[in-house]
Amino acid sequence: MSRFRGLVLLAILIVASVVVLAISEVSFLGLTRGGDSPLGLTFGLDLEGGTHLVYSVVPEDGRDPTRDDMEGVRNIIDKRVNEFGVSEASVQLLGGGVDSVPDRVLIQIPGQTGASISLNFGAGTVSAETLEAFFQNELGRPDATVKENENGSLTVHLEKIQAEVRDVAGNVITPSEADAWRARIIAQYPVALQVGFILPQVSTPVIGDDTAVDPIPTENVETLPTLEDVQAAFASIGRDDADIEAINGAEGLFSILMYGLDISRTDKNGTPILGEDQKIQTALRSIGNVQFTSSQGTLTQWIVGGGVQEAKNVIGKTAKLEFRYRECGDLLPPSSDIPWPPDGLSVDEWGIERCTNPTYFTESATEIDAADLEDAFPSVSQGAIPRPIVSLVFNEKGADAFFEVTDRVSRQSDRLAIYLDGEELVAPGVSDGGISGGRAIIEGGNFTTESVRTIAIQLRSGSLPVELELIQERNVDAVLGKNSLQKSLVAGAVGLVMLLIFMVAYYKIPGFVASVSLIAYTIMLLAIFKMIPVTLTLSGAAAVILSLGFAVDANVLIAERTKEELRSGRSLFAAITAGFDRAWPSIRDGNMSTIIVAIVLFWFGDRFSTSVMQGFALTLAIGVLLSMFTAFFASRLLLRLLASTRLGNHPNLFVPVRDQSGSEPRGNS
């Protein structure tokens, strides 16, 4: 019975592995694995092509960075590389052991050889094929290729993008090609909007209540906006070109088709501005009570990358942490004759918009220096309902500046905005006067345990003035990588077929069992590589082929031991059991020695920034461990299963060809 349970387990493992490899992208327990590559495997730079960069971290203040500091540096670089428009880049920390801190950063940028543009349309309304045709035919760039990324964004790869040219005085002589393309793309692809209005809720007088007011006359009840009202609202912001229609049978519901919707939140200098979508929202609120708005086809992302050199420039910048004073819009009207809140906002809407909409707030620098932030760490509030928070600790100088700023923020009901690399992290308010003592907390309604940890690391790393020194750069051509991959696959396939033929022809039934085990081993190994995931490099492919040799060697030892037991007069079942038991110590010791060597190679690869060595060691170790499982479990199970059939009555089928002469082995009788 145990034999059949083992067979069922083996079948489940193989079927699951086949399913994992057959599905290009696998999602399981919140993890997503796979992609567009063959079998969904992750390939390294030497197979896919790209750039390999290693940076050494050099703190300017002379102190050694902590592990959390390094994790913050890694997060910042990872964010920069991805914002740069590179898909599936890898950022890892190198160096350090159990008791030491990593001191280098490895960045691998696959396929990054020219320039690129990363863009995203709302609801994925534009396909990669359509955008590629537009670049090639309408923009005159036949070298453009477009790839769809995992998050639905599109990346346009080009040989070169003409940058903006300015004269000595700073005047623009030739605008950037990318800016002109962005305007044409916005004008090319339409944005479909829908907006719905509702009537305001009107209080109904209560019968018998002395304070009840007279019923509101019907003619004074606000009506829903008409088509003409919506057209006038769009015309008021200069968008009278919008094609607006009232949806039949749905009063207060309108559809709008327009071109050229720009939702930029900052200008070229980084100053906050009101995007066109925000202007539309304000205009619509001025004519009625907006219940909902939805849009499709909006260009929500546009990031231009100028190849490896620009990526290096972006990566190498020191993180910039800023504390800005955000002066929110006035809570009370400046004068009694001005309608307030402005732009038709309700009191509740104004309470949000005054501090979050760039139209209504201004920002200025503060005296708080990022270098004065001594520590930031995640914590939990002490209230009735514990909430995740971020605790800040400033030095004496920073504490004084922090008190002055927070005192003003509290008195004016304003905000203290914290930016990292020009992007807002949080913008908290202060409720109980200035914060003294150099300690403070940041809390937010959407904070989670993981998010406060991330923010704390970003704040600490931002306050640490570090420099990144490029100590290693290696470029691999994509064509060379593809050729290497093809040759590796051909070599592996030819070697595997020749090996299977030899094993079956020479060892007969044990050879057939070994061949089946090798096929199962290969399928499960590739599935493991996909699910971990393991980045498969050219050296890793060599390690896979080498681990196949270890798997074969184990099966050869088992077959030879089984043959010796048969020749000594044991029955077939007893010979198989004894053969496995006696071969196992040799298989175990040999493979464990190989695993120890792989661990040493991986350690050296980590210490000396040699990812090729690390890939070889990791792939070899996984392959050897799996080969031990298939040799001792799968091969033993299949061999005993075949011995229990009629084949067991012909023990010569279990003996190699060259050992057919001599005493006759005993069968199962």
Image (cartoon, grey):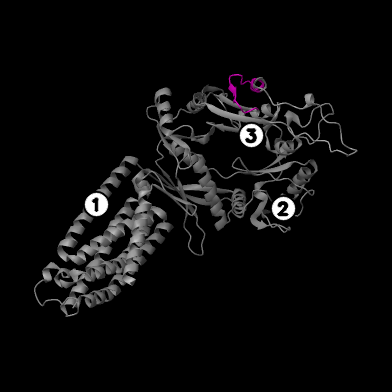
Counting from the top left corner in percent of width and height, residue 495 is at 22, 55
Q: Residue at x 31, y 43 (%)?
A: 482
Q: CA distance from mark 2 to mark 1?
A: 63 Å
Please indicate whether residue 326 sits to the left or right of residue 521 in the image: right
* Residue under label 3: 292
Query: Disc 1 marks which amino acid?
Result: Ala
The three-letter amino acid code for the residue at tag 2 is: Ala
Does any portion of residue 615 appear in the rendered image? no
Amino acid type for the residue under numbered disc 3:
Phe
Mark 3 or mark 2, which is nearer the start of the sequence? 3
Cα–Cα span, label 2 and label 3: 38 Å
Q: Earlier in the sequence, mark 3 or mark 1?
A: 3
Q: Which residue is mark 1?
A: 493
Q: Considering only vertical position in the picture, is 273 above or below 33?
A: above
Q: Quadrant of residue 239?
A: top right
The residue carrying mark 2 is: 440
Q: Over which residues does the magenta segment extend?
A: 230-251
Residue 434 image position (x, y, % from top left): 78, 48
Q: Is residue 121 above or below residue 611?
A: above
Q: CA distance from mark 3 to mark 1?
A: 58 Å
The extreme left residue here reads 661
Near-viewer residue (646 or 277): 646
Sequence-wise, the earlier of marks 2 and 1 is: 2
Residue 385 visible from this viewpoint: yes
Q: Residues within 10 Å of mark 3 (few under 14, many from 20)?
A: few
